[in-house]
Every structure is written in C-alpha cells, then in structure tokens.
Amino acid sequence: MTLSEEARSRLADVVTLQPTKNSELQDRWGLESGSDVHTYLESELKQYYYRDENSLIRATPEAADLVGIELDDDVVQVPPLQGEIVDTLAGPDEDPQSVVSTLHDLRERGVEADVDSVRSALRSLADKGIVEIVRKTVPTFRLALDRASIEVEVLEGPGEETSRSQ
C-alpha cells in the first residue's frame, strides 16, 4: 500500500507518540474530534496501527520501518506541554501534586495551559510510565523516575526541530 505524504507524516506521529490517544493525535493533526482521528486511522493507516490492552494507539513494527524511524527505548518522545510537565512535576521522593498545583507551577514558568490540557498531559505521561498517579481525595501526580534518568525529546510542530532535556 502506497501512502500519501500526509499519511506518511501522520504515521510518523503515531510511531513517535506511542502509546498515544485519539485526543493527542487530534491536537497534533488539527482535526475536529477524536472520532475524526479514528476514521482517519481506519481508512488510511489500518494495517500500521493497533490498540493495546488499555486502548492506547500503538504502531506496528512495520510502521516504524516504513517511515524510517528508529525507536530508542531510552528516549520518550512527547508533545511540548508534556515536556514542560516532566521538567516541573514533583520528583519520585516528593509529595505528589494535584492537576491544579501542576498548572500553577507551569504558569509560574511562563507556560500557557488550561486545567483540561494539563490533566490530559499528566494522564498521557502516566500511560507512558513516566508519571505515577497517587490516589488521595483527588488524583495527584509525581514523576515515577528520577528526573536525571529520563531523556525526553519534545516534538515540535511539523517542520520544526525537536529539543531534548534531561
């Protein structure tokens, strides 16, 4: 199956962002809804992705080969807001933070975000194993790993360079 340039680019997003959700791809691709993402995946990329046991979107090994992306298990690729959260969130030995506390810390650093996007980003980082959820009256979050042991590559928009932090 020959993929269009758009489909190849979007498949590269699936490969680099995995495990991911419809909402992350919706934001990245500028689509109207998660339903539009699902429709696109099913119509254009069906043989190159699957959903894992948690319904997260993952690329097949053939997808990475097709788009020429060599995956590094030591590097987690994340959108910009998630990268800021990794740099901001309480460490594994510190008291966990609520979504609102994380939002305030991000705003102090000059990051523009709203509570829903921070909540979604925290849950995506938890799906990737970088953040743990500590259940209290409200869910709170902290890094699951020492900050120094995490290599994060922040994905920029199409055509922009990526940046790394440790």
Image (cartoon, grey):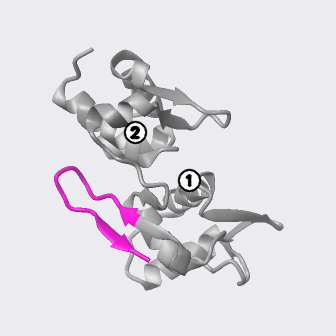
Mark 1 belongs to which amino acid? Answer: Ser
Between 124 and 23, the residue placed more toward the observer is 124
Q: Residue 124 — which label?
A: 1
The residue where tag 2 is placed is 14
Give x and y (percent) for residue 15: 39, 41
Which contiguous range is marked in magenta? 153-166
The picture places residue 31, in percent across and down from the top left corner, at 33, 36
Left/right of residue 130 with respect to residue 111 in the rendered view: right
Numbered disc 1: secondary structure:
helix
Q: Is residue 154 magenta?
A: yes
Residue 75, visible in the rendered structure:
yes
Q: Position of residue 163 (x, y in %)?
A: 29, 68
Look at the picture and state if 69 lies above or below 91.
above
Nearest the viewer among 8 and 79 is: 8
In whole angstroms, how far apart are the C-alphas of marks 1 and 2?
14 Å
Q: Residue drawn at (59%, 63%), measured in percent from left and top?
A: 130
| Location of residue 137 by image quarter | bottom right
Residue 138 visible, this angle = no
On the rendered image, what quadrant is the N terminus found in? top left
Q: Position of residue 156 (x, y in %)?
A: 28, 58
Q: Main secondary structure of the magenta part?
A: loop
Cβ–Cβ below 8 Å for labels 1 and 2? no
At label 2, the amino acid type is Val
Residue at x-position 61% and y-position 55%: 123
Question: Within 10 angstroms of label 2, few (less than 14), some, or many (20 or more) residues?
Answer: many
* Position above or below: 69 against 131: above
